[in-house]
Amino acid sequence: MGSLEELTGKIIEDGKIQAQRLIDEAVENSKRELEEKAREIERTCDNIIKEAEEKADELYHQICAEKEIEIRDKNLFTKQKVIDRIFMEAFAQLKNLDIEGCKELLSRMLGEKDLSNYILILPEKYFQMETGIDTFLNSFIEKDKFPLKIVYRSLSGGFILDKDGIEENYTFETWIEVIRQEMEREVLDILYGEER
């Protein structure tokens, strides 16, 4: 019986050793799997954090760009209102030009121009002051540059020269519109350069 007990003891002892080895292997395998899973989760977390940072950076730049556009638009709107007001005030002052101002304007703009064969069209408001205009325009007779005739029309200011049905428009509305278009071009060049 002693050898049976010894044999059984040895089997039990071998079984315990083998069980311990299996347990140790299982623990080691579990540790390796857990470490691999931890590294995989860490990589996933790093990727998620990186994507979140990229999206946050992209969103930040998008919001900044939108705000810059919004601020630029508000500035342009404000500047446009100021320009509108300035042109309206300028037009109002030009519209109320008296006879002396009209004479000075005509003298500066027509002084060197040969007006023969032209019709000079003036605002109706100067019709009642016609003698003042005629006296003034007599200075052009000496230079043989006097227009064939003067016509009065409902212009708000300035004048029109008509030669054979072709009109040269020197009304204040036209001047202001031309100046305004030139200014808008300059503003666009400043804002956008040559890329338009």
Image: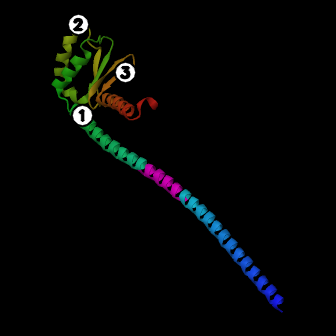
Nearer to us in this view, 101 or 87: 87
Residue occupied by mark 1: 90
**Callout 2 touching callout 3 (CB < 8 Å):** no
| SS assignment at label 2 | loop
Lower position in the chain sequence, tag 2 or tag 1: 1
Left or right side of 144 for 169: right
Q: Around disc 2, counting alpha carbons within 10 Å, would you say few (fewer than 14), some (14 to 19), or many (20 or more)?
A: few
Residue occupied by mark 3: 167
Identify which amino acid the numbered label 1 is placed on.
Ala
Mark pair 1, 3: CA separation: 24 Å
Q: Position of residue 196 (x, y in %)?
A: 46, 32
Identify which amino acid the numbered label 3 is placed on.
Glu
Taking the view exactly as shown, the residue that stands out farthest to the top is 143
Q: Quadrant of residue 82?
A: top left
Identify which amino acid the numbered label 2 is placed on.
Lys
**Callout 2 touching callout 1 (CB < 8 Å):** no
Q: Position of residue 103 (x, y in %)?
A: 19, 21
